[in-house]
Image (tube, rainbow, N blue to C red):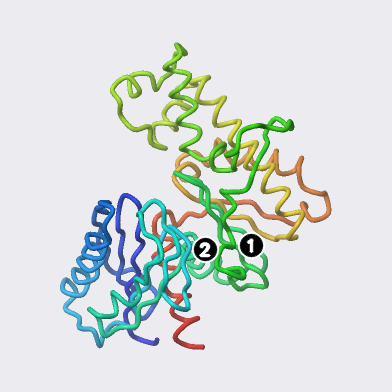
Amino acid sequence: MQNKNLITVDLGGTKILSALLNGQDQIVDRFKEATKITGEIDPIIEGIKKSVDTLIENNSLSSNDITAICLGVPGTVNPNTGLIGFAPNLGIRDYNIKETLSKYYNIPVLIENDVNLAGLGIQQAELKDNVKNMLVVFIGTGIGAALFIDGKIYRGSSFYAGEIGHMRINPKGKPSKKSKLTFENIASRTAVVNAIIEEINNGKKSYLSSIVKKGKRIKSKSLKAAVEAQDELVIEHLTGSARIIGSVLGSIATLLNLDSIILGGGVIESLNDFMLPKIRKAFNKAVLPEPGKIVKIDYTRLGDDAPLYGGIKLAQEFLES
């Protein structure tokens, strides 16, 4: 892989973010394209192709100059076969995207879950492989994770490892008749925003009331602005989310004896100063003291670049082994 370029594509539910990395593992060009969700696969394939072709053409390269195309997908994927099992945000099920893309490019196509790819990027570019047992957790529309054991990514027996967002959580400690009290349905940005909107619609006053009345989306930056404005409603729901996140992570750290937990995603990126102390406090209450005292809880500074760097480790794993 020396002195050759690499293209990483982060395929998301709203955007396709791609990057060209050079032989020194540096991002030298980026391209962003809106994801077209129509229920059909063709517009998504065209979006990926446009991203890859644009990076190649804008940098006067050919297929011979590219080591691999690494694709991150928000769903369950088999990196060995290139099969997407299920990507709900994209409306894709049981589709081999590697086979399709390989028809267009004489370049190895590698596929990985998007959070796994971000975890690989954090391990490579931010932590410099200076980590052994790590959990990377991204909190945004949903909650997903990447798990590293003895320095290597752990994908599980059928590639479902890291799906912590679907863990059943009972925040009040009482049996519930509800069937979908999952981690992400309670603590994700989506869950927090939905709870805030419901209370505003029921008459509660908030810094975000005007946004809700206009029917606009509440993004992480709006939540940050509300916290800075000392909005009690937003602070209450974000504090509840942080407590649940910390408690869940404490239980996981007790089980796995982790040394590092790295947080990412829009909520953490915008609100790390507010969220992290509360997450750490709840974590310390939930984790057993002995395994808990060695765990470093921090957030990634890479932002959207994390999965883009992840292509480096993915290519090393599948092309150099």
Evaluate if marks 2 and 1 touch, with contact meaning CB atoms under 8 Å apart.
Answer: yes
* Whole-percent x, y for residue 251 in the image: 73, 49
Secondary structure category for the residue under label 2: helix
Determine whether, in the image, residue 140 is placed left or right of residue 97: right
Q: Is residue 62 above or below residue 297?
A: below
Question: Disc 1 designates what residue?
Answer: 134
Q: Nearer the viewer, residue 247 or 86?
A: 86
Q: Is residue 249 above or below residue 121?
A: above
Quarter of the rendering containing residue 129: bottom right
Q: Nearer the viewer, residue 143 or 312?
A: 143
* Whole-percent x, y for residue 96 in the image: 37, 72
Q: Residue 256, which numbered label? A: none
Determine whether, in the image, residue 199 is placed left or right of residue 132: left
Question: Disc 2 designates what residue?
Answer: 119
Q: Nearer the viewer, residue 164 or 130?
A: 164
Q: Could you tell me the amino acid type at mark 1?
A: Met
Quarter of the rendering containing residue 42: bottom left
Secondary structure category for the residue under label 1: strand
Q: Is residue 191 above or below residue 121?
A: above
